[in-house]
Amino acid sequence: MSGHSKWSTIKRKKGAADAQRSKVWAKLLRFVEVAAREGGGNIDANPTLATAVQKAKAASVTNDNIQRAIKRGTGELQGEALEEVMYEGYGPGGVALLVHCLTDNRNRASQAVRGAFNGGGGKMAEPGAVAWMFEPKGIAIVRRGATSEDDVFMIAADAGAEDVRPSDESIEVLTAPEALKDVVVALRDAGIEVESDEVTQVPKSTVALDGPDAKKVLHLVDNLEELDDVQEVYANFDIPDEVLASVAS
């Protein structure tokens, strides 16, 4: 599993106990609303909306709240005038970062993101400076257990997956964004537990980090994600498991 994907998984498991639920819910529902506005309210035909709904449900957002957010996105209910903005920058050790924002005030979001970069030993970059280092992909995480890597590979590949990457605790299945749902359905139909699935930005290559720079980057990512307007942060770091676990604790 890639470094940033693993860090996100660690934080999801830890975050259930210590996250500020109302703030997390607000961000997730914004994501649902904008996904529905841009791609329609049909989850089956809108992979971004499917990801947004899956994330919201994983955080125990109620179905009523999710459905209201979808209706705001499709115009059935009045919603906020939200704008989607992507900021780019570099962190300690030369790590590339994409910062996905949903905001009703672009200037406020830009200032807040810039402040987090400057305070965390990084710097903002011009549009396009690092975006080319990432590509949209679907990712499904399968927990290791009774299922072998070979079984996951064969079933996923037959359903349209592009790659399978094993780690000690899980197996990461990569797909084109539009193929994610078919792959997840195929795995579940075969009795394979899918721990999570989402459409995300995957780095084309990674930067190996350890020591002080690794901890600085992780803290920078966390500080960016704490900003109200920030929806997701994508990074191309590769950090040892023991460092990830140490910072998370």
Image: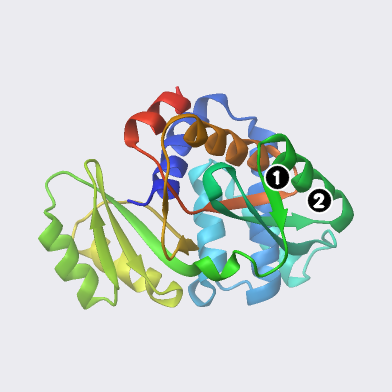
Q: Secondary structure at mark 1?
A: helix
Say which amino acid is labelled 2.
Ala
Q: Nearer the viewer, mark 1 or mark 2?
A: 2
| Residue ID at (63%, 54%) | 66
Seen from the viewer's position, the closer of residues 156 and 62 is 156
Would residue 105 be visible to someone looking at this image?
no
In the image, residue 173 lies at what x, y percent?
30, 61
Q: Is residue 209 above or below residue 201?
A: above
Query: Number of callouts in the render?
Result: 2
| Residue ID at (52%, 52%) | 235
- Point out which mark residue 26 bears: 1
| Residue ID at (42%, 55%) | 206
Residue assigned mark 2: 109
Q: Residues within 10 Å of mark 2 (few under 14, many from 20)?
A: many
Residue at the front extreme of this rendering? 93
| Residue ID at (75%, 47%) | 113
Would residue 165 be visible to someone looking at this image?
yes
Seen from the viewer's position, the closer of residues 66 and 8 is 8
Q: Are marks 1 and 2 in contact (CB under 8 Å)?
A: no
Question: In which quarter of the view is residue 121 placed?
Answer: top right
Image quadrant where one finds the C terminus:
top left
Question: In which quarter of the view is residue 209 placed?
Answer: top left
Q: Secondary structure at mark 2?
A: helix
In the image, residue 203 lies at what x, y percent?
46, 61
Reading the chain from its start, which is encountered first: label 1 or label 2?
Answer: 1
In the image, residue 229 lies at what x, y percent?
75, 48
